[in-house]
Image (spheres, grey):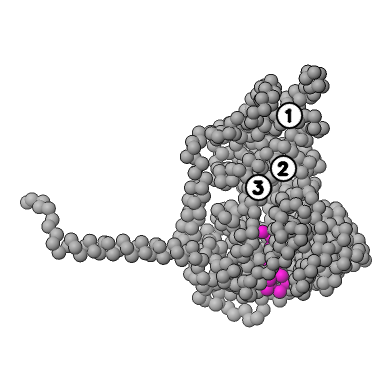
Amino acid sequence: MTTDLERRIGEGLRGVADGLTVVPPTVDELRARANRGAPASRRLRGGWWPGRSLSGRWAGPVLAALAVSTVLGLATVAPGTGLRLPGPGGANPGVATGDAPALPSRFAGMSLLTAPVSTSPPGPAVALYRQGSLGTRLGTSQTLVLGVDGRTYRRLDLAEERGVTGPDGEWHAAESLLGPDGGQVAVADPARLTDHLDLVDLRTGQVREFPLVPPAAAFPLSWTPDGTRLVVELRDRPWAEESATDGRLVVLDVGTGQMTPLPRVAKADMFDTVVVSPDGALLAVPVQAGRIDILDLAGVRLRTLTVPEGYHLDSNAAWSPDGRWLMVRRLDVAQDALALVDATGATTGIPVPLPGFQTGGAHRTTLLGWTGPDAVLLGVEGRKDYEIVRRSLDGTTRVLSRAGQGIGQVARVDDLRLAGGLVTDLRTGDPGDPDRGPWPRWWRVLVAAGAGLVAWSLFRWVRRRRTTVPGTVRPDTGG
Amino acid sequence: MLVQTSAPVEPTFDAVYAAHYVPLVRLAYVTIGSRTAAEDLVQDVFIEWLRRRDDVRQPVAYLRRAVVSRCHSWLRRRILERRHDDSRRWAASALPPPDGTTTAVRAALARLRPRQRSVVFLRYYLDLPIDEIAAALDCRPGTVKSLLHRSLAVLQEQLNDD
């Protein structure tokens, strides 16, 4: 059935595409070019861009530099953009949150001067997320961790450095997965073959490497609740976005480094994930559309669950803390919705979708965790702010935290995940000024150079005045 | 001899070329935003098909897949230009003055990733079913649905603003 939205999209597309006057070359001309064996496209070989000179090839980098400079300038002068350039550390600790992990009622604005984990480890983190736009290297995109105090922000520089240019031409950080206690992050490259998977200790900044033999494209999927094992999907060829190749699942013991393959088990779809049960003994693996297998950690299938049509297991926080439910999400064309599947396989006839859990197409929803057996935390990508929402299974909703995304979503929040073991104890409030760690070296060099330039200019100006003022003979203006 | 071997293929090529050249140029244009490059890419694909026509059993599916693939290769090579010129290229196109819906869709397209633009065009301009779109993009139907879902969110937002 065609909706009004789809009808309007069709109309708009015809307006965009049909206005293009296309004059096909003759078939004979194409055949002649094919038979010549010459490069198929003539205009693509240099100077094809309309009105573009040779020097124009510098336009891209120059524009990129200008864009970054503009963002820096905006960040300095316009706090409303959502970007901030703060001092080296937060001075106001704000409301004490005790030992409980804290979420700020409002995330600090994105900063280009946040220190990296490698040089300034933040300690255990409550959240891991991406923020920014235009990719990592030339744009503002960052991978960030937020400390359990709710005010310490650091860039996960290893994930940013291990990124890759994606099929859409943009730089994508490597995949990262925060451990359940927030103390470690797994970083892996699904987009290229590598010979190791990394584990970053957020307390020390140190990195442990786990060899992949043979090299593989790796995607960290889910931690066991005790943080001792990690379920990873491995592929034999780079996992380009939307690739249709199948992967294989392994369980990595991060204590011993041993990898145990799950025999003959593969995920059905790239947007599905594998979920570990709250007791760490079982895995839920979507093996085909509408079917989830419940396995033990050796890969032995214990039972099979039926998933409502169109729904996917796409959050590694999907298993309820009492072990009974798996929350699945509909990835439909125009609307999100959430539903429950009885993980024990005993119950059928659960209402689909859950009442009060439908969201409009413009507001994508991600399950972040369960705060108890009857309430979940959802990440809602709103138009203005990103919101972390607590929602009871009866549909009651409360916004716990917001993150501004800046003008034009220049600081867009994406892929936010919470430390699974900290969700039930989370408190929210105002944790005080953000602590972003020491300024990065490039900024210190820039500031020092700027200060030096100002000092040198001042020195020359003062010296000029001293040498000219006492003996100045002004030109006679007559009179 | 050459005439004999190529004769059975010629009508097929002519018919497919006549029927699909223009829609494929429009697919490439919507995906990459450059008319000149779109025409070049599609001509490349047809020439490639001429050279490999004995290997191609489903020419339309092959052509769509090849166009989408080349669009993305082209975009990778022109990453900097694309980052800074996308919206302006669409805005500066010498096209008739658009209506409100066209303007909104054009603005939404500028916010989408190239692969999402391809999917939207294949679905809502060519009215292709999910399976054929998946074949064109070399991905699974579930992936197409997800791409459409995300694209529609942006389109809906833009059209609601209109």
> Which of the two residues, B132 or A399, is positioned nearer the viewer here?
B132
Q: Is residue A282 left or right of residue B36?
A: right
> Where does the image place residue B41, in percent across and percent down from the top left?
65, 34
Q: Quadrant of residue A14?
A: top right
Instruction: State the SS at label 1.
Output: helix
Q: Which residues are magenta?
A: A174-185
Tell me which chain the residue with mark 2 is part of. B
Q: Tell me: A363 left or right of A86.
A: right
Find disc 2 in the rendering and name its residue.
B119
Give the number of callouts.
3
Q: Does the rendering let one see residue A344? A: yes
Q: Do circles 1 and 2 both sit on a common chain?
A: yes
Residue drawn at x 80%, y 46% as measured from the top left = B141
Q: Which residue is mark 1?
A: B51
Marks 1 and 2, how far apart at CA: 28 Å
Q: Amino acid at mark 2?
A: Val
Chain bearing tag 1 is B
